[in-house]
Amino acid sequence: MSTRLETLQRLMNLYTAVEQMHSTELQRLTTAVREAQQAIAVEQSVAQTARIDGREALTAGDRVGWMMAETQQETAGWRTQRLEEIRVERQELNDAAREQYVASRLRKEQMKRVFEEMEARAEVEEGRRAQGTSDDLFLSRRRWTDAKEKLGENKRMKAS
């Protein structure tokens, strides 16, 4: 039985390692999504600043400044659009990693329950064996004592 428990323990350790690997992957992908969101926020800020600069250039009558601001705004818009696509891709990967992590955690918990159940059964079985050995020892002593008493009675009967 201990070999089975050792095998289950190794299997449980493997499930734990796999769960940890999935957890790490989920954390990595969550960070990647967060980085994409931050980059989008930066680009939106750049676009906002370019809009403000463009208005100021129009107010001042600076056509070159206005054109530069428009170009910056368009470029920021394109980058924001591309970053949003990247964020969506990363979010999909993150969602898949989350599902994989949850499934992995569930399998590990199931394996843990199986291991604990087998361990409890092994303890009960070991207790039964110990009790059986104790009972056998008690019975053999009882038989020995009974046989000794019977032998003593037989000797007394013959002596009388």
Image: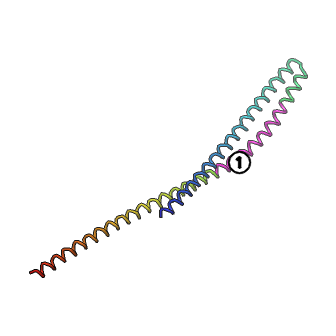
Seen in the picture, residue 90 relative to 134 is either above or below; the reply is above
Q: Residues within 10 Å of mark 1 (few under 14, many from 20)?
A: some
Residue 72: x and y, percent? 84, 29
Q: Position of residue 147 (x, y in %)?
A: 22, 75
Magenta residues: mostly which secondary structure? helix
Q: Secondary structure at mark 1?
A: helix
Q: Is residue 131 above or below residue 58?
A: below
Classify residue 136 as left or right of residue 66: left
Magenta residue check for 82: yes
| Residue 5 image offset from top left, x and y in percent | 50, 60
Asked whether, in this view, residue 157 is left or right of residue 142, the answer is left
What is the tally of numbered marks visible in this picture? 1
Horizontal placement of 95 versus 51: left or right?
A: left
- The quarter holding residue 35 reads top right
Residue 61: quarter of image: top right
Specify the amino acid type for callout 1. Answer: Leu
Closest to the observer, 133 or 157: 157
Q: Residue at x 85, y 19 (%)?
A: 59
Is 128 drawn above or below residue 80 in the view shown? below
Residue drawn where x is 58% and y is 54% of the image: 15
The residue under label 1 is: 93
Looking at the image, which residue sits at the far right? 63
**What range of the chain is rendered magenta?**
73-99
Q: Please say whether residue 9 is one of the residues in the magenta stretch.
A: no
